[in-house]
Amino acid sequence: MSVALRVEGVSKQYRIYRRPGDRLTESLTRGRLKRHREFWALKGVSFGVERGTTTGIIGPNGCGKSTLLQIISGTLEPTAGNVWRDGRVAALLELGAGFDPEGTGVENVFMNAALMGFSRRETERLFPEIERFAEIGPFIYQPVKTYSSGMFVRLAFAVAASVEPDIFVIDEALAVGDAVFQHRCLRRIREIQERGATVLFVSHDAAAIRALCSRAILLSAGRVVQDGAPFDVLNHYQKIVMEREQAYEDETTASEAAPGQAEDEGPRTPLSYSFRHGDGSAEIVSAELLDASRRPAAFVETGSPLTLRVRARFNREVEDAVVGFLVNNSHGIHAYGTNTKEQQIELGLLRRGDTVEVSFAFNCWLGLDRFSVSLAVHSRDGISYDWLDGALFFQVASPVLVEGIANLNASATARRVGMRDADFGLRVEEQESDAITLSTNPQSKI
């Protein structure tokens, strides 16, 4: 398969000045007085994209994704390196790029089409389809500066997707639109894929990357960290996100051992959480979510087998303590929860200093979303010993669309039931031994 796009050693440097006057001082002295610091948004990025494929680019904020797409689209020059493109490029970059806020929607449609090499006659032929897809009504004749962000993206995507590009570049713009428009855009992207165009897709939506892309590239600090199958790359990305969240939430340094830690427990990274409460009778000291290979699971396929392992240490003598967990979606809605009491496991008498490890095995039949896990140790009558909200996070994805908070893993069957219109009447025939025929043909006899 031929290559449609090649990025070779691309780097981009920005000069950061503390004060506006520093730029003037440096210019007047012809650089003898240095008043800036250098920031490299990209460092030696190289990859090739085969024609007709869809590549997802993902990474944390500030990693250089948007800068890279601007260089690929030709709206920004690299400090070093080269980009080779084969064919017409249509780009849907950050909100506001390439549009004149004072011009009307119609004027911006013709201007953007002209920048992509279309004549006025060709744009007039495409305009009805662009107007229908954008679906912003009479606002298309109003200045763009009066548009909401959703209306702006509708028009920008309609223009970019209607010109039948050879290379289609999308930079996180779809997150602004509503659910109906997002589905329409995803359908149009699939149509573009079927025509054999090359698509570069930047998004923080792991489900969209998983569904649309055959390949993913992970950027971090301006460099390519991983390039490969979407599932593997997204799993690595989710780990980076979790590490950043943990670093933000940690109240103690990783080098400090937890108070009273048993010698056989070994070194342990402090638990992170968004909220914690309890009377201190017990303390959750570690928790991990593992996949079928007993590796930490940060990004999982819906339906995959998982194991949640929780370890708690007791600070006083208690009888029949209960250990449990609760899974919440990104909106805080409870998706599933259980505990050792519901699982009919009795922990018996536990003395001060005892440590208990409980493992919960389940199949992750959840919908496409980002989920958090809350952990708890409490008495049988509900008195909290230790409760941690947001202790673990994981992302659920699927190669096919799954709507809702849960995946019920439904199956479907279909059969013909012998219904057909004939002689302007309805005739229903059940192909069984005691078949009954109902006819409304005016020529039939009852």
Image: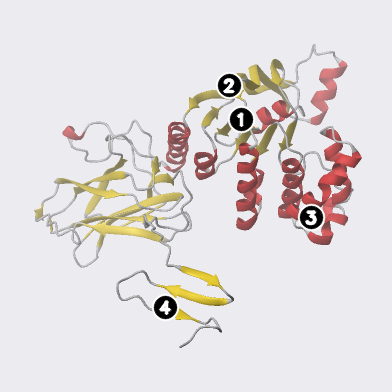
Separation of marks 4 and 1 at Cα, in angstroms: 54 Å
User: Callout 2: helix, strand or loop?
Assistant: loop
| Label 1 or label 3, whichever comes before in sequence order | 1
Separation of marks 4 and 2 at Cα, in angstroms: 59 Å
- In the current view of this chain or complex, which residue is farthest to the left? 349
> Which disc, if any, is residue 52?
1
User: Callout 3: helix, strand or loop?
Assistant: loop
Q: Locate residue 328 relative to residue 79 in the image: left or right.
A: left
> Which disc, if any, is residue 147?
3
**Residue 381 picture location, percent across and down:** 20, 68
Query: Which one is in front in this view, the residue at disc 1 or the one at disc 3?
Result: 1
Query: Which one is in front in this view, the residue at disc 4 or the one at disc 3?
Result: 4
Q: Amino acid at mark 3?
A: Tyr
Q: Is residue 359 above or below residue 443?
A: above
**Residue 312 picture location, percent across and down:** 22, 47
Q: Is the Cβ of the residue at disc 1 closer than 8 Å to that at disc 2?
A: yes
Q: Amino acid at mark 1?
A: Gly
Q: Answer with the quarter of the image where residue 337 lies.
A: bottom left
Badge 2 is on which residue? 1
Q: Answer with the quarter of the image where residue 146 lies.
A: bottom right
Q: Who's the residue at 74% across and 35% down the image?
A: 90
Please indicate, yes or no, whether residue 279 appears anywhere in the rendered image. no
Q: Residues within 10 Å of mark 3 (few under 14, many from 20)?
A: some
Separation of marks 4 and 3 at Cα, in angstroms: 61 Å
Q: Is residue 240 above or below residue 319?
A: above
> Which disc, if any, is residue 437?
4
Q: Answer with the quarter of the image where residue 11 lies.
A: top right
